[in-house]
Image (cartoon, coloured by chain):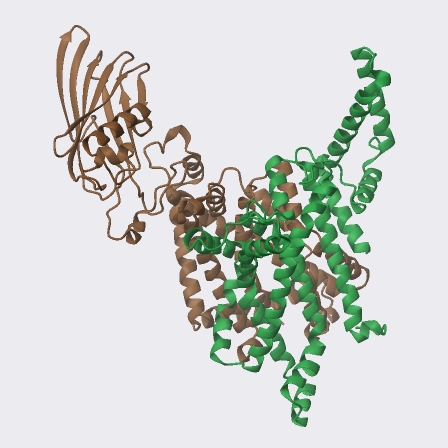
Amino acid sequence: MNPLKSLRPISTSLRELLHYKSALIGLSILVFLIALSLYSIIVYPGPKAVAYWRGEENIWIKNPKNAFPEWWEVFSGGKKLPRTIIINSYGGQHSVDIIQISNGIYMLNLSLTFDYYYDEEPSAINVFINGTSGDKIELYWIYPDNRRIFLTNITLNTDKTIYYLSQDIHLNNRLVMDLYKQISSIKYSPTIERILFAMPTYEFKVQKGTYKLVALCMVKNSSKFGLELVLYGRVYGIAGTDHLRRPLEIALLYGTPIALAFGMLSSVVISLLHLIIGVISGYYGGTIDTLIQRVTEIYMILPFLNILIMVSIFYKLDLWTILVIIIALSIFGSGVKTTRAIAMQIKEMPYVESAKVYGASDLRIIFLYIIPKILPTLVPSIVISVPSFVFLEAALSLLGLGDPLLPTWGKVLSEAQSQGALYKGLYYWVLEPSFMLILTSVSFTSIGFALDRIVNPRLKEI
Amino acid sequence: MATIVMATYLTIIIANMGGYVDEIKKAEITESTYQAFMNNPAYKGLPRDQLQKLIEEQIKLEMQRAGLDRPFLERSLMYLWDGLTLNLGRALYMTSDSGSRLVKNIILERLPQTVLLFTTATVINFFIHLYGGLYLSRNYGSKLDKIVVSLAPVSVMPGWFYGIFLILIFAAWLRVLPYGGLVDYPPPDDPLLYALSVLKHAILPITSWIISGLFMGIYSNRTFFLIFSTEDYVEAARAKGLPPRLIEQRYILRPTLPPIITSLALSLIASWQGAIITETVFEWPGLGLTTYQALQYFDIPVIVGLTVTYAYLLGFTVLALDIVYSLIDPRIRSGLPV
């Protein structure tokens, strides 16, 4: 018998697969995930994703912290939630008057203008200042109704300074006091951002219109001087940001190829090893069989997860070494027992006996006659077990044992967990990686279950 | 029994691959020797350097006595004995709730919580799957049957994963159940209230495991019973006109009992393992959360001790399985070949 003939069921069953609605859904999700993987590999080639995720050189400093994804607005009851607004004096809407007072000292009247039409105040406000050490700056805030508030005086000590406006306690105290003087009984808890964007009423309501940040500066080098106002939003991008201001979409995107590769590799390799060992055990019988069976029994009661945890904490492994260890720890699993039972039946089949008669070697019989016969029946279980390895990676990350560098779904989940995302109401942080995990598992299992019905027709009847 | 010993041995060998067990032993000897010398009034008057020399000599002697200079094979057998007798050394940083630094005490203190939660969950699951499977095999082809079959794939998602969603819904959103933990803080004095409080905290973790196993468990039992209910002797019993209950109990359940018990034992084993993540998610103070805490503190003796304990737990489950098997399977009981 031509061993390749027994492989035919795979291609026919693939065609048959399209008759199942659930398999079609699974396949289309899988295609989507693969497309996503390719996209993210192109957008973030290896080291770039890691560098982005580690947030080197403060690249995310102008992103809001823990911002919801933009689509979250659907649940906000028709409110328009603020996006991040960045206005600077290097371009865009600003005006500047420069007067030279004396040699080397300039007086600058710089104003940054922006429109604000959102229904909530920004989550934080920072002013990034570029200049020369010794420059003096006075900052004013002008509302759309032309009220004017003095913010602060700054003298630069270094060339670059960030004025954390939201965290200025003196400003906070002064603004709150002034507010109580104007309106005796306000009905909201005043924060700097709220006061700077509120209508002068009891209830908090954002004053919509054109705002201005005015800076009166005495500077030494007027060409070098620049201001940047960052109004951090409450929503960001399609996936939101985490506590380190990183856009979650990086990890969600880049996690896709990692999860797929990790899940499929471990599932395929482990199943194939089980198959080979099981067939060897069943085919040879005798001492080899006994030995393999005993080892399998011992392996089956090894505390797999604990040993994995122990090994990965001792040696601080990266993802691919963890993969190798997972494979090494599961070489002798329950799959060995099942394939052994099947192999013992196939061994007695006439085509194997005839192969023996014309002198095929044992290895030839094992690899070209028996294994190809069993392989198709294993495909469903290989496909079905892919998600469990993806979840295993997530579980390891949840314990803090995942890959130290790569952004994965499990890591997002683990950070959300350790930052108390659910407690703080930051549901998106948990829901997004979970959604990706669910997509992956639904895809593989629905394909696998459909395949199972095709390959093991007895299931189709019942 | 030999399997347990072998599994523990393998665990210890893996644990000692980086020489970690040796480290633990050495640290322990050093500490106890220092303690002995410092607390001994006979050495009070000795100059510092002389005392140091004495201590070092003593440590060397103790290490020889403990066999740390012997070849690895011999040492590993010694560790095996220590592991099997639960002589697991001292923790580096962690203490048990009663203040003990012994790994054994830390583990034994947390073990009951894990057993309580996950044995309950597994047993509940077992009965739901058994009766659910029986019911569906009786009503096979019904709407409910089709729903369960089509939902079976959702069981790939592990219990802890559902746990996160349950926390999201019932703790964060609806605020009716606690986020995690074992009891309310402060713990109630009345034992009845205490038990109720523990029960309240156990609802979400147990539910998460029930949901996770539900459809797949019922589905596989149903298929299993369906295959058995087409056997000739069942058909014969039906032809005789025996009531369906009797057929179910004597003709379907009885012969399928051994594999069902096996699956119970396997799910118990899986529950000990899965406990690590689920307990971490729910902050349930059992062995799993101890594992997580030991990881945070990098407390190696505890990690090694836990691994050995787990090897033990799993081994005993399998041993118990063998005994139960011999009770329910007449072929094994009478010594006939299976």
Q: Is residue A126 left or right of residue B184?
A: left
Q: Residue furthest top?
A: A103
Q: Position of residue B223 (x, y in %)?
A: 59, 75
Q: Position of residue A118 (x, y in %)?
A: 22, 43
Which quadrant, please, contains the C terminus of chain A? bottom right
| Residue B296 vertical position relative to residue B55 in the rendered view, above or below | below
Q: Residue furthest bottom?
A: B240
| Residue A134 vertical position relative to residue A95 in the rendered view, above or below | above
Q: Residue furthest front?
A: B190
- Residue at the image position 76 percent from the left and 48 percent from the top: B8
- Residue at the image position 51 percent from the left and 81 percent from the top: B141
Can residue A364 be seen from the camera position used here? no
Which quadrant, please, contains the N terminus of chain A? bottom right
Q: Nearer the viewer, residue A42 or A388?
A: A388
Q: Nearer the viewer, residue A396 or B128?
A: B128
| Residue A365 vertical position relative to residue A419 in the rendered view, above or below | below
